Amino acid sequence: MSFLKVQGTQIVDGNGHEVVLHGAGLGGWLCMENFISGYPGCEHQIREGLADAIGKEKAEYFFDKFLEHFFAEPDAIFFKSLGLNCIRIAVNYHHFEDDDNPRVLRTDAFRQLDRAISVCAKHSIYTVIDMHTAPGGQSGGWHADGGIHYGSFWRHKDFQDRFTWLWEQIATHYKGNPWVVGYNLLNEPADPHPQQAGLMGIYDRLHNAIRAIDENHIIFLDGNTFATDFTKFPEDAGTRWRNTAYSIHDYAVYGFPNTPEPYTGSDAQKERMFKTYQRKRQWMDERGLCVWNGEWGPVYARQEYDGDATEGINAQRYAVLRDQLEIYDKDRLSWSIWLYKDIGFQGMVYVSPATPYRQHFAKFLAKKHHLAADAWGKDDKEVKQFYDPLVSLIEESVEDKANLKLYPWLWSVQERVTRITRTMCLAGLMVKEWANLFKGMDEAQLGELAKSFAFENCLKRDGLNEVLTAHA
């Protein structure tokens, strides 16, 4: 068994034969996300909230059982049956160290990650370790687990020092494992410096620290501004960072509720998707570097929220999926679709509505959906009327309209207002309501809730999986 490596624009095995990685992201597991498992806010908020509601011991029991059931051997067997060969495992730094005890590995730091990597290897599935959160948060996204609208990671050197230390621990632990393709160092960074000086500095530090320990594993580097911008990367990247691939995230606007128009697969729509994809990878193509699409994929309508329109909406989303894959096939692009498992919005498999978890939280999930309390794939038609006046007030009050444009540039005034007021403030205020729904449960009941996420209690999104298999 040989390590995979980057050779020019390709990923190859020990004999120099090309290996194209086709897979999915295992999100919502070692890095929990609100839209994936149904809680409001950020992971650290709901972990603290649940401990307050039912006690630390019971809360830890629930989360441990959740991790046990969310990904296990039946998941790996199914994944491999689709012809897919790689899983990108999103992890939260909190699983390795505590904020109140930094630079000290938790006693169980690698237990769950080791288990997942081992079961994947058993079924000939490669893995990529994706650091989805950094101390302080590398962006204002909920998935960075910061709970605020900017990334404190870029403002405090100690966060960066801790992060470097953590990657040294991970590299030391996995340096001899060839089933681990490599290390995706920092998911969707949002360094606000005009020249991306913070990001280039941390990539230099991490590369040098890891290469002092491990020369074999591929390093995957996301572009700045949520893996879209490589324009400030160094011209000598190809020699400066050894055995390195560059990660774009290629979400198509037609795959979401806020699509500018229904997707019909017209030449103009296909051309727009292609040009967006081409623009993201242009910097690497001009320099002969290896590109990996670390995240992409539509979200899907749900019968309980979208009613009779569900089937028609999803037919359009599958068409987006197919047309994106046709673009990728021509480039022999390695990709990792987002997402393997959730509660019914984007996953290849999803928790059945008949399970104890979906039944117990049904009203809360509906409320959260109607309030558009999650940022990802939001449909805000029922609450937009309440936020638009605030957006208008801000736009009218700032005299120089150029001052309305702040980093990250893709956050319009409306996006910034609704993220801060709704998906951070409102969502944070809903944490206790979510946690209180666990009150009065014993361990057996908590275990049944957690077991809802086991593969045998999930449904398969056949339309999605059939398309993936056809292009795997």
Image (spheres, rainbow, N blue to C red):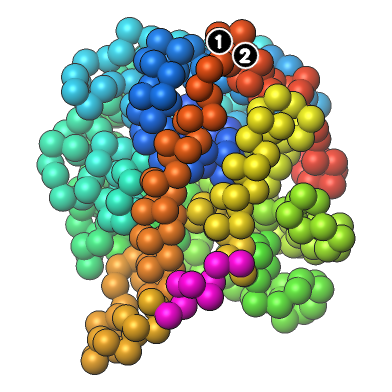
Q: Is residue 292 left or right of residue 416?
A: right
Q: Is residue 83 above or below residue 468?
A: above
Write down the region rendered in magenta.
Answer: 382-389
Which quadrant of the figure has residue 337? Answer: top right
Q: Is residue 243 above or below residue 165?
A: below
Q: Position of residue 54 (x, y in %)?
A: 43, 19
Q: Is residue 314 left or right of residue 248?
A: right
Q: Is residue 340 left or right of residue 116?
A: right
How far is disc 1 from disc 2 in space, using C-alphas? 5 Å
Q: Position of residue 311 (x, y in %)?
A: 86, 57
Q: Could you tell me the amino acid type at mark 1?
A: Asp
Q: Is any part of residue 287 visible from this angle?
A: no
Q: Position of residue 103 (x, y in %)?
A: 19, 21
Q: Which residue is mark 2?
A: 445
Q: Is residue 162 left or right of residue 223?
A: left
Q: Residue at x 62, y 69 (%)?
A: 381
Q: Which residue is mark 1?
A: 442
Q: Residues within 10 Å of mark 1 (few under 14, many from 20)?
A: few
Q: Residue at x 80, y 35 (%)?
A: 460
Q: Is residue 143 above or below residue 83?
A: below
